[in-house]
Amino acid sequence: MALQEKYKALTDAATSAGISDLAVREQDGILYVDGTAADGATKDNLWDIYNQIDPNFASGDLVLNVNVAVDVAVTHAKVITQSSNLNIRKGPGTDQPIVGKAAHGEIITLVNRSNDLWWLVRTTDGEEGYCYAQYLEAQA
Amino acid sequence: MKTTNFLTTVMIASTLFFVGCGPKDAAIQSAIQAKEAADVTVAVAKGDVTLTGEVADDAAKAKAEEIAKAEKGVKAVMNNLTVKPMMPVVIAGDADLMKNVADATKDFPSVKADVKDGVVTLTGELNKASLITLMQHLSALKPKKIENKLTIK
């Protein structure tokens, strides 16, 4: 209960931001907050609040797993690496060979999102393979 | 004749009773319904309120009852609301977690990540700006805990 109190500002913000399927549970001294945000800005705002309550995430008493909702109709995504190119791999994993690259900021075609972590994509050059989903932002 | 009179009286009386009661119940119902959360359904019969539906937690259930009790004209409140069962915490197995942590930390060469019993332990150093990104990536992998021992530059 103490943890729920510590992170109350965060869970309140999640509730008022309309996070869907919001679940807040405490188990073995760790608070687990799961849900789906409507957009990336909402998710980032929750992380900012988390960082304020627990500077540099040093306490290790919260696992904040808020994903950004992606509409099934979405067919394109933007590469949101910090600045570098994004590797396109033969299979879902960094142990897989690189079959191509997508430039930072490039818009590429989404082929399949059945794997949460690795999305199957196709570039304008026709290169097809898997990219790390955290570096892709679905285009409405 | 007497029986007919009696029946007529009963009919008039009951009509008056229902006419007198119906609109009042309807008014109470709509007044309470307007104040309740969308997932609460309100029914009113002769001033007795019944609440049905599924709410997120016990606090929401108690709040819904309070709202109904506070309404003028309410005799009793039957709280039949159910609390939505909480999704259990899912923790990834170490084999999956190790592979996914390796993928997630690949772009952070100054960070070393160890996985044991679902706990991801981070050592090494990282700049503050990259820390949120790394934590976001790791938190999506369903770890039990993220032990952050990084030196933040």
Image (tube, rainbow, N blue to C red):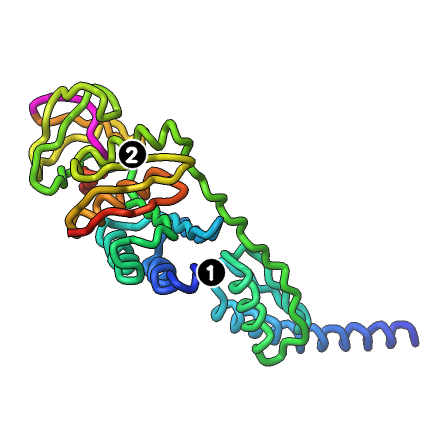
- A39 over B46 or under it: above or below: above
- Amino acid type assigned to the residue bearing label 2 in the image: Val
Do the residues bearing badges 2 and 1 touch, measured as CB atoms within 8 Å? Answer: no
Q: Viewer-nearest of labels 2 and 1?
A: 2
Label 1, on which residue?
Answer: B38
Q: Does residue A37 appear in this view? A: yes
Q: Which residue is drawn at 50% across and 58% down?
A: B39
* Relative depth, front residue between A40 and A64: A64
Q: How crowded is mark 2: few (under 14 residues within 10 Å), some or many (20 or more)?
A: many
What residue lies at 91% left-to-right and 72% top-to-bottom? B3
Q: Residue at (67%, 70%) from the top-left corner?
A: B48
Q: Which amino acid does label 1 sit on?
A: Ala
Near-viewer residue (B13 or B33): B33
B44 horizontally vs A124: left or right: right
Q: Residue at x 72, y 76 (%)?
A: B17
Kindly identify which chain the residue marked by label 2 belongs to.
B
Quadrant in which the C terminus of chain A is drawn: top left
Residue closer to the observer: B127 or B6: B127
* Stretch of the chain drawn in magenta: A125-133
Verify whether residue B68 appears in magenta.
no
Q: How crowded is mark 1: few (under 14 residues within 10 Å), some or many (20 or more)?
A: few
Above or below, comparing residue A29 to residue B25 in the picture: above
Residue B102: x percent and y percent?
26, 31
Look at mark 2 in the image and give the residue it sits on: B101
Q: Is residue A140 visible?
A: no
- Asked if badge 2 and badge 1 are on a common chain, one would say yes
Q: Which chain carries label 1?
A: B
Residue lying at the far bottom in this picture: please name it: B72
